Amino acid sequence: MSHLRFKICVFGDAGVGKTTLTQRYLTGIFHERYQLTIGTDFYFKKLKINDDDVSLQIWDFAGEEKFRFMMSGSLLGAQAAIFCYDITRYATLESINDWYSRFKEINQQNNQEVLSLVVGAKLDLEEFRTVPREHGLEMARNQNAVGWIECSSKSGNNIMDIFEGLTRIIIRTAVEKKKAKSLSLFP
């Protein structure tokens, strides 16, 4: 048994549901209203994956343009990032390209590989959907994300799957990298 620590950043435009997603996962409670995040809020969650104790450090990043300069500090040392859009606002899916552009630039500058997941939020508002599922999936593929999923913070649908599934992928990726490195003839 080991103790693992991972940092996951949550990005996306203002109002897409990043804070409600994070809070629903952390507390199991949905609140209709939250104040806009100023800069970055971060939280801790302990869980067990297989026989490993895992501590997640979850960074909830403000969606306003004026805070984007803080993105590089937030991503430093992260293992994964979640990119959220609102299924009822197509523009929030389109702006994922801008978020990813900065994300890739920061990772290249820091010589790091950070996994990513694309998440469509507000699934409970299906009747107001403007983003077809196929477009969300296509975004994830185009950005080489490890996956795509839709969720509802209100109902709790897929919330656990997002964080725990992503954590399992982080662990699996780390194990594969470690095996590949140990098999390498060169340091």
Image: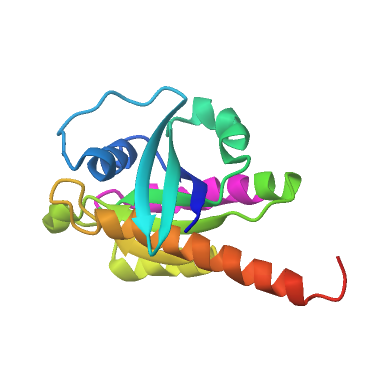
Magenta region, residue range: 88-104
Q: Let me know if residue 100 is in the magenta part.
A: yes
Is residue 11 in sight in this rendering? no
Query: Vertical placement of 104 versus 38: above or below?
Result: below
**Is residue 100 found left or right of 58 in the rendered image?**
right
Query: Vertical placement of 186 versus 25: above or below?
Result: below
To which quarter of the image does residue 13 belong? top left
Q: Residue at x 46, y 47 (%)?
A: 95
- Residue 89's x, y, as percent? 29, 48
Query: Vertical placement of 32 versus 153: above or below?
Result: above
Give the main secondary structure of the magenta stretch: helix
Is residue 93 in sight in this rendering? yes
**Is residue 139 found left or right of 120 in the rendered image?**
right
Q: Residue at x 41, y 22 (%)?
A: 38
Q: Residue at x 70, y 74 (%)?
A: 180
- Residue 80's x, y, as percent? 51, 52
In the orientation shown, which residue stands out farthest toward the front?
Answer: 1
- Residue 183's x, y, as percent? 76, 77
- Residue 67's x, y, as percent? 51, 27
To which quarter of the image does residue 161 belong? bottom left
Q: Let me know if residue 149 is in the magenta part.
A: no
To which quarter of the image does residue 110 belong? top right
**Is residue 106 found left or right of 30 in the rendered image?**
right
